[in-house]
Image: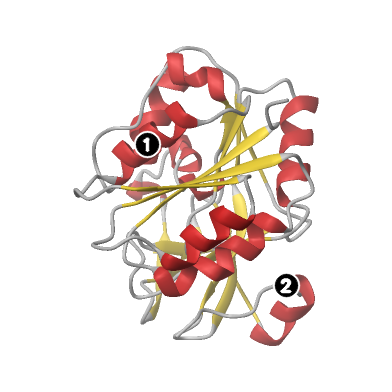
Amino acid sequence: MPPLVSIITPTAHREHLLPAIARCVLRQRVDWEWLILDDSATPSAYLRALALQDPRVRYFHSPTRLSIGAKRNRLIGEARGSVIAHFDDDDHYAPHYLAHMITTMRENDADLIKLSGFFMYAPHTQFFGYMDLNAKVGLHYELSGQSVNHIEFHEKMQIGADFVLFYGFSYVYKKSLATVSVFGDIDLCDDESFIRPVVEAGRKVIAVDDPQSSCLHIVHPGSTSRCFSRYSMPAFVLPTLFPCYEGLPA
């Protein structure tokens, strides 16, 4: 029997992060397989060993450099599940994350589900917050990994509804969408290149909040995009909301 969901993770030069994301995968409460495509200079000793121990883990190494979008396309082509889930190598996914996302997607008869609100943490500044992609105006905290700045969103900034579509670390969708769209051969905004044709084709995309504390987006100096947190919260509540999060490895 094929697995319900194929978790895909493109990675490169992040060997120190792989044990943490592996723990997130192994704790998921659905029938899964995990596919990783790595174009680091040398293959991951950790993932090679894990794949030998657990047949649900499928590790691929490319000797040539690939874009993040190209890696996602290749992983989807290898996937056996009927549902694809993005697990980025530097984020944290709680044990109930996939079960909740897939149930919500099915209850709404959606083709793709993502988070419109999510918790975020920047270890270098110890900023803990919550991002609300539906908030078009008001005070926000701009995070770059090494700094926190205040920024006021206002109407003239023209932050459109499609802002909700970005941040693909939480994409969960039917594999059949691969017949509608592919990821661009790019490293930045590959999520946007995929989701826009899906929306234009009339497929149902839903974006939901995260009241169950199911996903923690990590912002660090190596992050590829800036984030704008709508709310700031005291960092001491983070272990209560995310008891399995063990911190960003050195």
Which residue is label 2 attached to? Answer: 244
- Disc number at residue 47? none
Q: Quadrant of the N terminus?
A: top right
Rendered view: 63 above or below 85: below
Name the image quarter holding the C terminus.
bottom left
Is residue 154 visible from the viewing direction of this image? yes
Q: Nearer the viewer, mark 2 or mark 1?
A: 2
Q: Examine the rendered structure and indicate whether residue 141 appears above or below residue 196.
A: below
Q: Nearer the viewer, residue 182 or 118?
A: 182
Disc 2 marks which amino acid?
Cys
Between 172 and 50, which is closer to the camera in this rendering?
50
Residue, far left: 64
Measured in 3D between alpha carbons, the distance from the residue under mark 2 to the one under mark 1, in whole angstroms, is 30 Å
> Outermost residue, front direction?
52
Q: How many marks?
A: 2
Q: Along the polypeptide, which appears first: circle 2 or circle 1?
A: 1
Please determine whether, in this image, residue 29 is positioned above or below residue 81. below
Q: Residue 145: x and y, percent? A: 39, 75
Please tell me whether mark 2 sits on a helix, a strand or a loop. loop
Q: Foreground residue, 166 or 6? A: 6
**Amino acid type, label 1:** Glu
Residue under the point 44% across and 75% down: 16
Q: Residues within 10 Å of mark 1 (few under 14, many from 20)?
A: some
Answer with the quarter of the image where residue 213 lies: bottom right
**x and y percentages locating residue 128 in the rendered image:** 59, 76
The residue shown at (37%, 33%) is 74
Q: Which residue is mark 1?
A: 192
**Residue at figure coordinates x 46%, y 86% from the top left:** 125
Position in image of residue 28 (x %, y %): 73, 52
- Mark 1 secondary-structure assignment: helix
Q: Residues within 10 Å of mark 2 (few under 14, many from 20)?
A: some
